[in-house]
Image: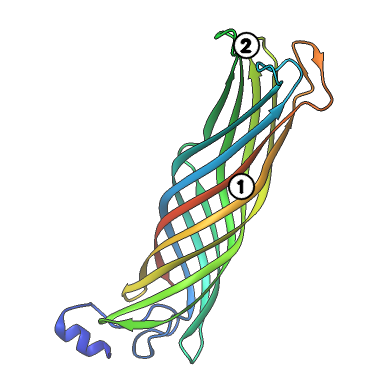
Amino acid sequence: MKKSSIMAKGVMIAMSMIGITHADNNNWTGFYVGADAGFVFNDAQLTSQQLGFTSPSETCDMSSNFSTFSPGIQLGYIYQFPNSFVSGIEANAAFNANQKHEFNCNSEFNPDVHDRLTFRNQMQTSVKGRVGRALDWNKSILLPYLTAGASFANVGLTYQNEGGDYYSTNTTQSGWLIGAGIEWAFIQHWSLRAEYYYVDYGNAINLKIPSVYGLEDPNGNGHIDLSSNNVVVALNYWI
């Protein structure tokens, strides 16, 4: 549908497409920058062992589901082929509002004895590809797409107990992501999109716990397996 007819009906301000080539050819080709906001639903599995741990088995195995609000920014480029198929690449950085989550391994025999491991996830960056197809549907210009790529999390893990033992480590862990979304060009140069993606970091971080209360253990350690489900809404400006 042409831009003039949409303006005449007052359904949209423009039927122009965002990107370097706008308007009459409905082309998504172009660079874009934008901001996003959403929620990350984390699934974390703690596994740790150490001589002198609070449990008789000298292990602490816990799983936890926790969420955080996560605003971010992105930039990318998309190319639309003559057959309306679209391909592109995007880089993203997201910051977590809730950066810490505690795992408390409490003694079965004494409530004052505990082992606390604190997991930190400050931010994630990602590089991902996008493939989809440009559609004109019900007078709207849409881009449903699939996305996949790599994600990098800035994570940390800390161990401490009531006796003053303290160990900490930080690292950047890579993982893979896959997802899908839909983008809507609602006005010239601007688009709005909704996206879901799943990220799996595997064994996200390892921490050595060499000694607790003076009991040395070269095999003492704790680690976190991490995956997440992410729901994001983004606003993009096309240059």
Q: Circle 1 is placed at which residue position?
A: 153
Colouring scheme applied when the structure was drawn: rainbow
Does residue 237 appear left or right of residue 15 in this picture? right
Identify the image quadrant of residue 129.
bottom right
Q: Secondary structure at mark 1?
A: strand
Dot in front, 1 or 2: 2
89 vs 207, nearest the viewer: 207
Image quarter (top left, top right, bottom left or bottom right) of the C terminus:
bottom left
Residue 154 rendering spot, x and y as whole percentages: 62, 43
Residue 39 position in % (x across, y down): 42, 48
Identify which residue is drawn at 28% across, 90% down: 1
Q: Amino acid type of disc 1?
A: Ala
In the image, residue 214 above or below residue 85 = above
| Relative depth, front residue between 16 and 164 | 164
Circle 2 SS class:
loop
Q: Residues within 10 Å of mark 1 (few under 14, many from 20)?
A: many
Label 2 neighbourhood size at 10 Å, few (<14), some (14-19), many (20+)?
few
Q: Position of residue 14 (x, y in %)?
A: 26, 80
Q: Which mark is residue 162?
A: 2
